[in-house]
Image (tube, rainbow, N blue to C red):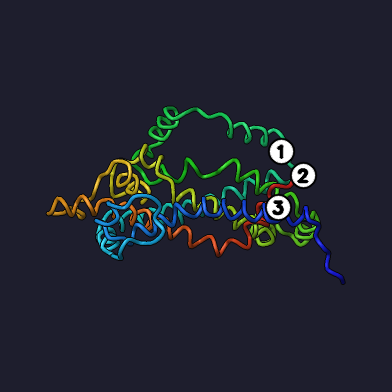
């Protein structure tokens, strides 16, 4: 089969397209590379540097050593892993059950409940009513405050519902003939054949729990329950350094505090980035399947 020859206009378009994509890639990747290079740089040389940082200024692991010696870092990791694992598990359970119900053609209240679901995406009671509700339910300063109020995302539920509605009706019908109930159909048939969408839901929910800090800032007061993102906020925005990071020399403190901020960002960001390659092959397919009109 002869190769298709591109016209001059096609070649110009390809060149412009590649240049644009390269430019966007640099814009997206450079902030992360800047933080990574800065985290390995010598503190004194880093403070004196001006302009774009293309490589580490010197090399030191001092910042990472200080960060990992901080009890807040390990405590934040443990709490965040708990919120992410338990929260994501509950998210998937409730979202998949809700999506399965709303994807059934025989469900009489399907349209009414779908409308009610969409309304919640645009209107809410606001921060104060939510706070009063969480407090009246006895979840203030409780780990459940970071899990139950966000147990279901309306957007994710709609995506999963749309994906479930694309499955052949024969799967459910043949299962019912064999005596399967709705729970068996959902957990043994629907979910296994919808792993692309499930992987997308895992990524969305897991990233949300890992990066979440606002609910913890509002509902938690005991520091031993803080997630890693809240400790990161204290370091970056409030410029608060843990007692484990105190320095005897003021000059050392001045130079090293900037280094600690960069190291803390890397330490809190890399673990969630590691998850993405394992879900990448499902991601594009899952988003496309869930975006089709049911």
* Mark 3 and mark 2: Cα distance apart in space: 18 Å
Residue 116 at x, y = what percent?
Answer: 63, 32
- Mark 1 in CB contact with mark 2 (< 8 angstroms): yes
Residue that mark 3 sits on? 289
Residue positioned most to the right: 1
Residue 149 vertical placement versus 201 (above, below): above
Residue 70 at x, y = what percent?
Answer: 25, 57
In this view, the residue in front, 65 or 87, is 65
Residue that mark 2 sits on? 105
Residue positioned most to the left: 248
Residue 260 vertical placement versus 274 (above, below): above
| Quadrant (top left, top right, bottom left, bottom right) of the C terminus | top right
Residue in the picture at 40% in, 29% down: 132
Residue that mark 1 sits on? 110
* Mark 1 and mark 3: Cα distance apart in space: 20 Å
Q: Residues within 10 Å of mark 1 (few under 14, many from 20)?
A: some
Total labels drawn: 3
Does residue 242 appear left or right of residue 11 in this picture? left
* Mark 1 and mark 2: Cα distance apart in space: 8 Å
* First in residue order: circle 1 vs circle 3: 1
- Mark 1 in CB contact with mark 3 (< 8 angstroms): no
- Mark 3 in CB contact with mark 2 (< 8 angstroms): no
Q: Residues within 10 Å of mark 3 (few under 14, many from 20)?
A: some
Between circles 1 and 3, the one closer to the viewer is: 3
**Secondary structure of the residue carrying numbered label 3:** helix
| Quadrant (top left, top right, bottom left, bottom right) of the N terminus | bottom right
* First in residue order: circle 1 vs circle 2: 2
Residue 29 at x, y = what percent?
Answer: 49, 55
Residue in the picture at 74% in, 60% down: 179
Between circles 3 and 2, the one closer to the viewer is: 3
């Amino acid at each position: 089969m002869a190769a298709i020859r591109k016209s001059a206009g096609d070649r110009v378009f390809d060149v412009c397209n590649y240049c644009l994509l390269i430019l966007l890639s640099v814009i997206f990747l450079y902030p992360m590379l800047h933080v990574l290079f800065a985290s390995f740089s010598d503190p004194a040389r880093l403070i004196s540097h001006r302009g774009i940082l293309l490589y580490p200024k010197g090399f030191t692991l001092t910042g990472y050593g200080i960060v990992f010696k901080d009890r807040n870092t390990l405590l934040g990791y443990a709490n965040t892993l708990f919120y992410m694992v338990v929260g994501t598990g509950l998210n998937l359970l409730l979202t998949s059950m809700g999506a399965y119900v709303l994807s059934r053609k025989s469900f009489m209240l399907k349209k009414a409940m779908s409308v009610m679901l969409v309304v919640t995406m645009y209107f809410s009671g606001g921060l104060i009513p939510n706070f009063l509700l969480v407090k009246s339910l006895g979840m203030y300063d409780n780990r459940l405050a970071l899990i139950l109020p966000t147990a279901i995302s309306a957007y994710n539920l709609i995506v999963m519902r749309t994906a479930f509605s694309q499955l052949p009706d024969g799967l459910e019908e043949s299962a019912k003939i064999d005596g399967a109930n709705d729970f068996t159909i959902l957990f043994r048939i629907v979910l296994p054949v919808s792993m692309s969408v499930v992987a997308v839901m895992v990524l969305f929910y897991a990233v949300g729990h890992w990066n979440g800090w606002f609910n913890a800032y509002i509902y938690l007061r005991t520091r031993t329950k803080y997630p890693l993102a809240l400790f990161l906020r204290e370091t970056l925005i409030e410029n608060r350094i843990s007692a484990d990071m105190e320095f005897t020399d003021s000059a050392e403190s001045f130079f090293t505090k900037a280094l600690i901020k960069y190291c803390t960002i890397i330490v809190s960001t890399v673990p969630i980035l590691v998850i993405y390659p394992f879900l990448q092959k499902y991601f594009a397919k899952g988003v496309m399947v869930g975006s089709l009109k049911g």
